[in-house]
Image (cartoon, rainbow, N blue to C red):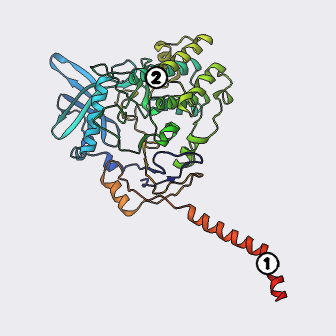
Amino acid sequence: MEGLSSIEILPVRGEEPPRPPARIARGTQPRDVLDGAASAATEGEQFGPYIVHEKLGSGGMATVHRAEQRGIAGFSKPVALKRMFAHLADDPMFLQSFVHEAQLASRLRHDHIAQAYDFGKEGDTYYMAMELVPGPTLQQLMNRARAGKGAIPLPIIIEILIQLCDALDHAHNLCDDAGKPLGIIHRDVSPSNVIVSNAGMVKLIDFGIAKALGSASRTSAGIIKGKFGYIAPEYTRGQLDARADLFALGVIAHELLSGRRLFRGESDFATLIDVREKTIERPSANNAAVPIDLDDVVMTALERDPNLRWQSAGAMRNALAAVARTVGVAVGGQRIRDWIEQAGATCAPSNAPRPPSIQTMSACFEPSEPSMVIELIEASSPRAGDPTVSLRPPSANAEANNKSFATPSTQRVRPTRAWKPVLALATCAAAGIAAWQLWPAIMAWAGGG
């Protein structure tokens, strides 16, 4: 099990984040915790109106199973049944988060967003029934391409990006019943949260950590959620709006076109510094087939200044469509479906007789790179300077907490005074230099005396 570690970052030179420095808490849970009561389903288990089948995946507070909704006269509807861990139902924070996800999902009705069908409680278990989307995740397709099993064709990449822009445009501009913008921000746009269905439709999934204006479920001040390699740089400084999702989409576009990860340091801290400071090459530097116009679209999405970035998903979508027309690319769902079938890119079943290539919301749980939390902790006396890192091993209490809860508990720690030894060393050096310079005068004075 990966333990809880913390990284503290002092603000970079010339900047003054609202709550420096940052503490990064990361942990994965043991399987015996994730496979709790909510996941202990047997084949054909009756759960309310649903017949539960095999587990598709586990997350921090719920599991997802393939299930069927049964009705009269032979009615049957396949769903992805997400069930909250029973031991979390008594925690108001987790329950509010689960309810928030269900309420938000019920409003998102778009062809390129996985739909929510039902929300309820059966016994002590809260659940959501969601659209079951057969097909590989974009992460799986990218892993397949990196393994040399066939690159994703440029027209397919452009179409995937266009459909994701459509999904984000819908979410970002959604209004409530009174016409007031909801201000939805996904906050976790990443390849593992995109499904390319066997029907050729791209689906954005898992709005579990999405943020909405006026929501009863609010993130505590200074808390940042998402995957490190796809977090917008301004988000690490406490600034967040819909343009952060477009930066994440730019990262995905760059990785699709270049065939390699954009921000992946040797540590979490290194990845965050890359997000803030790494020089970003144009995708064509690694793939000569990328036209300059497409380079420009991606690099605009990756502008670190959000004011220089695409200001809306619709604007980015129009730019991608213009590139498609310029290079003579005409792609639709049919072509994506044909490519998936020809490339054999569907997900192989992990155990018979599972229906092939089933992935769904939260079934794309990636143990190697889960969504993470960055907690910005206010320093008692923040100082501008170069980033300083302090890695702290997990304490015995933190280890125990990891074994007891579905998400790691975090300790607030005081900022590391990394400048103190540096200051002491500099003082000693200055004193030595002064003594060396004054030594001839001292000797002359002593001799004259």
Residue type of the residue flagged with mark 1: Trp
Q: Is residue 150 visible?
A: no
Q: Position of residue 35 (x, y in %)?
A: 30, 45
3D distance between C-alphas at marks 2 and 1: 72 Å
Q: Residues within 10 Å of mark 2 (few under 14, many from 20)?
A: many
Q: Earlier in the sequence, mark 2 or mark 1?
A: 2
Q: Which residue is mark 2?
A: 164
Q: Secondary structure at mark 2?
A: helix
Q: Nearer the viewer, residue 194 or 375?
A: 375
Residue type of the residue flagged with mark 2: Leu
Residue at 59% over, 46% down: 14
Residue at 50% over, 60% down: 416
Please identify the quarter of the rendering in which residue 301 is found: top right
Q: Which mark is residue 213?
A: none
- Residue farthest bottom in this picture: 449
Q: Position of residue 110 (x, y in %)?
A: 36, 18
Q: Which residue is mark 1?
A: 439
Is residue 19 placed above or below 101 in the rendered structure? below
Horizontally, residue 271 falls left or right of residue 173, namely: right
Please identify the quarter of the rendering in which residue 183 is found: top left
